[in-house]
Image: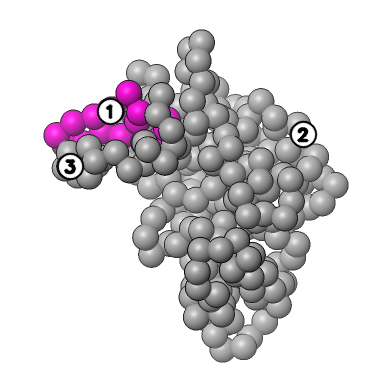
Amino acid sequence: MAERPIFVPALEADGYVKRMDFDIQWAGGFADVQKKKNIRSLHEAAERAGYSPLLEISSKSDEVAGRHLSAFHLRIELGSTDMPLECAFQGSKVFERGGPYTDLYGAEPKVAKRDPRLRESGPLVGFRFDGFEFPLTPPTVFYDWLYLTAIFPHRVWLKNRIDGEIRYAGFTDIEFNPAKSINCQAKSCALFVSLTRENKLERYLKAPEDFINAMSLHSSTSSEPQSHLRQARLGIG
């Protein structure tokens, strides 16, 4: 068994995103067929609790939109160039004894993520991207900013695809393990839906300060798991 979350768009008053955790039968292994089994198990568990349909946000998604929304597929513009989102995230980290290591902007995403300096420079203290400082609180604010900035040029197509033709109840990323990390592309996608529904996406993305302030005021509860894990364990809902 394993615990895995879904991320559900929510109102501003509810923190924009609700996380629901579910116990699922876990198929071990790295093969795509195993990961797809886990996706189905999670989606079926969520459906029993009333959350359907769901969209998997990863390269393992059965849907084109889900694959295109994978962070490894997205790119960030910086001046006259662009870079993979993963490289922007890793290369912008600031540590007590070094960083940001902006040379990682030009690396392959997997190489950037494994750069030894990211583990040898002491505790993470923040992020610096395009001359702006991003704090560690709220915990996912910089990753969310990058993700939303990357998909912003495609916002009309995306809204029609994931909140129009089909109105998804929530989003998943089967690779995300909340016991090991905090940033999740499925959570960022749910945030995109919430902000577009409330017509706040463009206003909040005008400047990093606006986004940080908005997330600090309203997203304090978004990363906390809700009651459906307990309900799933008890067979309720």
> How many neighbours does mark 1 have within 10 angstroms: few (below 14), some (14-19), or many (20 or more)?
some
Cα gap from disc 2 to disc 1, whole angstroms = 34 Å
Magenta residue span: 87-104
Cα gap from disc 3 to disc 1, whole angstroms = 13 Å
Q: Measured from the top left, where is residue 58 in percent x and y?
A: 60, 50
Residue type at numbered disc 3: Glu
Q: Residue at label 1?
A: 100
**Residue extending furthest toward the top:** 80
Q: Residue at label 3?
A: 120
Cα gap from disc 3 to disc 2, whole angstroms = 41 Å
Q: Residue at x 50, y 46 (%)?
A: 218
- Examine the rendered structure and indicate whether residue 160 appears above or below residue 75: below
Q: Residue at label 2?
A: 157
Q: Measured from the top left, where is residue 148 in percent x and y?
A: 57, 35
Residue type at numbered disc 2: Trp
Q: Label 2's element?
A: helix
In magenta stretch: residue 90: yes
Earlier sequence position, callout 3 versus callout 2: 3
Residue type at numbered disc 1: Pro
Mark seen at residue 182 = none
State left or right for residue 87 relative to residue 56.
left
> How many neighbours does mark 2 have within 10 angstroms: few (below 14), some (14-19), or many (20 or more)?
few
Q: Residue at x 18, y 31 (%)?
A: 98
